Amino acid sequence: MFLGLPQRAGLFWLAVVTAATGVLVVSWSTTTPDLSLAPAALLFAVACGVAERVQVRLSSSRPGGGVTFSVSCTVLVAAILLFPLAWVALIAAVGSALGGALRGHRHVLKLLFNMANLTLSVAVGSALWSVGGGGVAGLASPVSIPPIAAAALGYFAINTGLTAAMVAFVMHLPIRLVWRRSHAKVMTANLALLAVGVPAAGLWLAYPWMLVCLAIALLAVHGAMSDRVKLETQTLESLFELADILDARDKYTHGHSERVGHYAEQLAVQLDLPGDRTHLAFLAGRLHDIGKCAIDNEVLLKPGALGEDERNQMRRHPEVGSAMLAHFTLFREVAQFVRGHHERWDGEGYPDGLRAEAIPLESRIIAIVDSYDAMTTTRPYRVALPHAEAVRRLEAGAGKQWDPRIVSVFVQWAEQHQAPAVAASLAPVATSAA
């Protein structure tokens, strides 16, 4: 641990904050800033701080991986086009600090990271604007279109990339996966917010009072963006809460769904699945037992062997869970993976008796990690098995109960990453992108 974060995340935090500090020091020490710009810069810093208060919480796969996106990117794109580097870096740093104060932000490490993130992002955007000749040509010339686009996209790439990297280092996930999960579905709204910064700069130069009208339009974009993610976020949180409530019915399975989701996600990464499928594997693992809401407590918590009728009742939970999830448009693919997580490689599983590769890949992933977690945690009918014994049983069942290739990949990952310790220490972090 470093600064209370996993080592890679802590070192990354230090690098980002140090680099941003360097940008501020160098930009102010190597130039003679035009102090006549101070009132306008202060106004933009305040506008940035207020805009930082207007945020959208992007959908996240689990608590601790939250990413927020604010409309301050519009203000900062305008600042990049209007101010030299020293001023725009200061606007970003002060605006981010003010935004944190307005939100009542008390997490110092996060606030400093967000300030550094915005500072580096606008520095890159400002450099691209200057190198592209935009600063010389000015906003009035069509020649400025390419450097404007480069500046805005450069700002966006650095800002969201640094945020995704921090979350990825904390959650032990690929950066591309975290970035895509957070931003892919709202890319159009993101680009719209960046684009609004261009007319904002033009209006500032020509008709500053019209910025009030532009601010109203900006709030409309924010509202549309917020509505776009609200349904998914609320649905995710509700289903996750239901899964956790079901786990809590039995003290022995507390946290089981969260661990299975984590293992499934990591295993999907090791199998080089695309980002979307990796996310689906996580969701299916997280919700694989949601159908147990239909199982009586007497059956679910029975310490001894189940009778035939009880086994039949228990075997209903994949079908029930799948039927529940199929009602949600966002989870129709996940539903089929939940349905198949008790199928067996040899065709002796349930509910459909699927065999080998006829079983969805995500279901095969969940079958392995679900069994591993069940074996390595204490249950009413037996104590937890050691990691080595659980691995031995997985390998013995490879080609019979489980996909042998996936068993091999999971065992290799579990040996390298000490799976029980990793799943037990899912560290929470929340980061902002502006």
Image: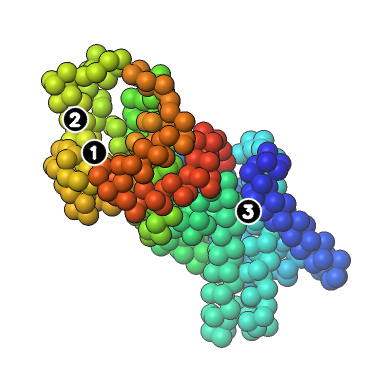
Instruction: Decide which of tag 2 and tag 3 comes sooner along the chain.
Output: 3
Query: Where 59 sits versus 138, above or below?
Result: above
Identify the residue at horizontal 35%, vertical 17% (top origin).
Answer: 380
- The residue carrying mark 2 is 315
- The residue carrying mark 3 is 48
Identify the residue at horizontal 73%, vertical 70% (top origin).
Answer: 84
Rendering quarter of residue 253:
top left
Q: Amino acid at mark 2?
A: Arg
Query: Where 390 sits versus 15, above or below?
Result: above
Give neighbour class at mark 3: few <14, some 14-19, many 20+ (Cα, 10 Å). Answer: many
Q: Which numbered tag is attached to residue 342?
A: 1
Image quarter where the N terminus lies is top right
Give the camera-side residue of 318 and 28.
318
Identify the residue at horizontal 35%, vertical 51% (top origin).
Answer: 406
Measure the C-alpha gap from mark 2 to mark 1. Answer: 9 Å
> Under tag 2, what secondary structure?
loop
Task: From the viewer's perspective, tell me whether residue 293 is left or right of residue 274.
Answer: left
Task: From the viewer's perspective, tell me whether residue 408 is left or right of residue 71.
Answer: left
Label 2 with label 1: CB-CB less than 8 Å: yes
Task: From the viewer's perspective, tell me whether residue 189 is left or right of residue 70.
Answer: left
Q: How is the image coloured?
A: rainbow
Instruction: Decide which of tag 3 and tag 1 comes sooner along the chain.
Output: 3
Residue 269 at x, y percent in the picture: 43, 54
Measure the C-alpha gap from mark 3 to mark 1. Answer: 52 Å
